[in-house]
């Protein structure tokens, strides 16, 4: 099957989904490909900061997401030896220190709002397999659906918003530099005890960060930093070796931890890495979000950066299509606007990681 669109977006995460909505709302014919068939799945990295919140409010999307369920954080607590060492409250002109937004709620709103436009099409269960080129310029993608159907998608611009392991980045042969981090991350999730307050708790165990993120529907997500590449050895130990330390750090979690974390299978390992691409653009192609600049989990910048990418890239695409100029020189306007901010955030993440232990030194 052959189809024609102005823009083909590969990856329907928050950034790609918001970009698709903004383009379709402007009357630009856009098709969005997503390899996952069922978007109702578990995600991590679901915290909005004020910048991400403001993007959604600007386009009158936040209230709809809020109706599905969000949870503002009332503060950040630093715990030591089972007690609160200090608390960070919202600034005087702010109402929270972040908002937990289930990604399935955010995507549900973005995709539902997009589908009302005739210029928009979403194909789930579909993966890009090849870039189509003409005179060295990207002119679309070849894709395959889960049922085996092959599709030729001709488009003026292809957007790679397909995450940290981007297929589009690989197909475009865009070099990238890995930014080293000295830790990996173990995730776990379980119901919160009764009367649990909507806060972010930070702890220090064996000189490593241990964070608790309160979530909607009365859940807690645990993020536990471990030495890079150490999980294979760690999991040879009884899981109680770690759950005991979690309980020592946060004694009020004892009942929940003992009930819901009973083996290493209750943890999910995230291989922490970030990256910096040599360029984000080629003729007819743009990378955005984690495909262009993978962020580490520190500071929860990833989701927010993707939303800001979409808002920034949108007018660049409109301008390029209006001028019939989809060259890298034209599309590079997006990278010029965003690259400095992104590299500053990545540097800030590294500084936050290096200085984390200092947060637990009493004045």
Image: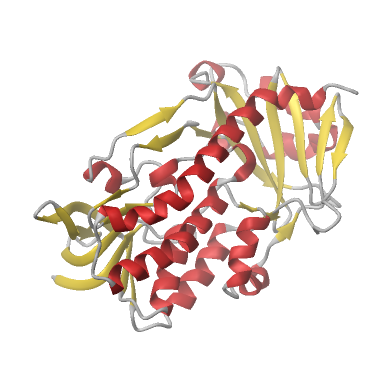
Q: In the figure, is residue 23 to the left or right of 247?
A: left
Q: Which residue is located at x 79 percent, y 47 percent?
A: 199
Camera-nearest residue between 243 and 305 = 305
Picture colour scheme: secondary structure
Relative to 142, 334 lies left or right: right
Residue at horizontal 24 percent and vertical 57 percent from the top = 327
- The C terminus - image quarter: top right
Residue 23 in the image, given as x and y percentages of width and height: 39, 72
Residue 43 seen in the figure: no
Q: Is residue 54 left or right of residue 116?
A: right
At which x and y percent is residue 315? 42, 67
Count up the numbered dots.
0
User: Is residue 282 something that shows in the picture?
Assistant: yes
Q: Say if 91 sits above or below 182 in the image.
A: below
Judging depth in this view, the residue of 257 and 70 nearest the camera is 70
Against 69, residue 121 (above or below) is below
Quarter location, residue 28: bottom left
The residue sitting at 47% across, 60% down in the picture is: 312
Q: Residue at x 29, y 67 (%)?
A: 7
Residue 295 location (% of width, % of height): 50, 40
Q: Is residue 48 left or right of residue 361?
A: left
Answer above or below: position of 300 versus 240. below
Residue 150 screen position, x and y as percent: 15, 62
Assign the N terminus to one quadrant of the image.
bottom left
């Amino acid at each position: 099957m052959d189809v024609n669109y102005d823009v083909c977006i590969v990856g329907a995460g928050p950034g790609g989904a918001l970009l698709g909505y903004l383009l379709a709302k402007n009357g630009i014919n856009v098709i969005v490909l997503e390899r996952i068939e069922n978007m109702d799945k578990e995600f991590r990295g679901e915290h909005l900061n004020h910048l991400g919140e403001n993007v959604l409010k600007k386009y009158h999307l936040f209230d709809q997401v809020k109706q599905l369920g969000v949870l503002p954080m009332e503060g950040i607590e630093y715990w030591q030896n089972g007690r609160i060492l200090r608390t960070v409250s919202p600034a005087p002109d702010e109402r929270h220190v972040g908002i937990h937004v289930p990604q399935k709620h955010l995507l549900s709103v973005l995709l539902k709002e997009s589908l009302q436009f005739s210029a928009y099409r979403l194909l789930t269960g579909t993966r890009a397999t090849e870039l189509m080129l003409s005179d060295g310029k990207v002119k679309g993608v070849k894709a395959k659906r889960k049922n085996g159907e092959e599709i030729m998608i001709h488009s003026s611009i292809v957007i790679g918003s397909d995450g940290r392991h981007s297929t589009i980045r690989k197909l475009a042969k865009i070099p990238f530099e890995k930014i080293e981090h000295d830790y990996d991350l173990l995730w776990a999730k379980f119901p919160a005890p009764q009367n649990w307050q909507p806060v972010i708790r930070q702890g220090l165990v064996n000189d490593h960060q241990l964070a608790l993120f309160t979530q909607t529907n009365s859940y807690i997500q645990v993020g536990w930093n471990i030495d890079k590449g150490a999980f294979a050895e760690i999991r040879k130990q009884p899981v109680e070796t770690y759950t005991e330390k979690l309980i020592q750090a946060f004694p009020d979690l004892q009942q929940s931890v003992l009930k819901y974390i009973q083996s290493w299978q209750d943890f999910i390992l995230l291989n922490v890495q970030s990256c910096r691409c040599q360029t984000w653009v080629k003729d007819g192609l743009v990378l955005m979000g984690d495909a262009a600049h993978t962020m580490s989990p520190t500071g929860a910048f990833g989701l927010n950066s993707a939303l800001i990418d979409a808002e920034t890239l949108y007018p660049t695409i409109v301008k390029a299509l209006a001028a019939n100029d989809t060259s890298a020189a034209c599309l590079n306007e997006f990278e010029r606007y965003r690259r400095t901010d992104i590299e500053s955030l990545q540097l800030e993440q590294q500084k936050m990681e290096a200085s984390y232990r200092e947060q637990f030194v009493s004045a």
